[in-house]
Image (tube, grey):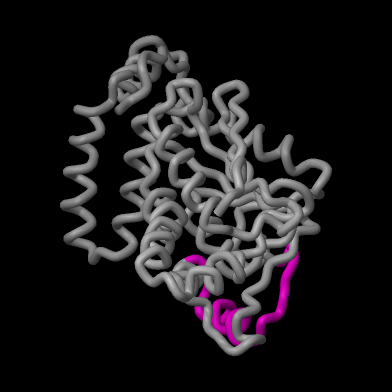
Amino acid sequence: MSEANTVTVQIEDAVAIVTLNRPAKRNAMSPTLHLEMADVLEKLRYEPASRVLIITGAGESFCAGMDLKQFFMDLKDNPPEFDRIFRIATEWRFRTLRYYPKPTIAMVNGYCFGGAFTQVCACDFAIAADEALFGLSEVNWGILPGGIVAWNVAQVLNFRDALYYAMTGDTFDGKKAREIGFVNRSVPLSELRQATIAFAKKLMEKSPAAMRYTKEAIRAVRFMNEPQANDYLSAKSDALRLGDKEKSREQGMTQFLDEKSYRPGFGHFKRKASQPAK
């Protein structure tokens, strides 16, 4: 637990790049990394200098999953501390990222194994290097993808692919990850950073409030029936209008109906940005 700087942050042009920084361990997640990552995400939550969050890994890996020695073996005789770290690890990789107020992108630059699937699934978007290597290797050494990994995989992949990769432990590259819908896009590694930042800047053209409420709505209605979804979306639309500091709906309507300067379906209206929506 004596590590430091296992997570680094770089903010440039309102894009925060958060990097898992244990390259010698393929960025396997140690207790210290979990604590630092939870702290970083909390600090960036309403940091006005950043509008979009990118998560990636240092060196040749995205993340090799949990650090088996530090996370499991070193804490096995200390149940209270294991429970504390486990809860923090689950929180930031699952609930925090899923409900983060800003758009999140997993930039998968290399090895992505086991527990690392959770943060990829929890991010709103994922862009991978063609050369990235994914795998659920747990079955090969006698365990299952636990710690909410299996649930996330079953949500993002189709049922047959989820079973296949979880039950065989076979690996797949970034191109295959795109083909089966695990990531939104794959590009050559040499283009990964540029492509991901370009996508982040595209998201930044949108109303922050509209982005946040749309994300929350899409995530929520997946588990609702039609009447529930209709009621929820009606209430969510009203909440957006009240919470949007930029008054995006009014701006768009004015530019379309009165000024004739905007055509819906052909890009975003010209935003007159104010303070980011809280």
Q: Which residue appears at 44% of the width and 46% of the height?
A: 38
- Position of the N terminus, as image quadrant, is bottom right
Q: Quadrant of residue 243?
A: top left
Start-end of magenta stretch: 156-176
Whole-percent x and y of residue 23?
A: 73, 51
Query: In the picture shown, does residue 36 fall above or below 205?
Result: below
- Furthest-top residue in this view: 259
- Position of the C terminus, as image quadrant, is top left
Q: Which residue appears at 62% of the width and 23% of the height?
A: 12
Q: Main secondary structure of the magenta part?
A: helix
Q: Looking at the image, which is closer to me, 276 or 228?
A: 276
Q: Which residue appears at 28% of the width and 25% of the height?
A: 244
Query: In the picture shown, does residue 205 fall above or below 134?
Result: above
Q: Is residue 83 left or right of residue 103?
A: left
Number of on-image labels: 0
Q: Is residue 215 left or right of residue 149?
A: left
Residue 165 colored in magenta in the image: yes
Q: Looking at the image, which is closer to me, 137 or 258?
A: 137
Whole-percent x and y of residue 77?
A: 45, 75
Q: Is residue 123 left or right of residue 198?
A: left
Query: In the picture shown, does residue 252 fall above or below 86?
Result: above
Q: Looking at the image, which is closer to me, 50 or 87?
A: 87
Q: Which residue appears at 49% of the width and 49% of the height?
A: 124
Whole-percent x and y of residue 112?
A: 67, 62
Whole-percent x and y of residue 67?
A: 61, 65
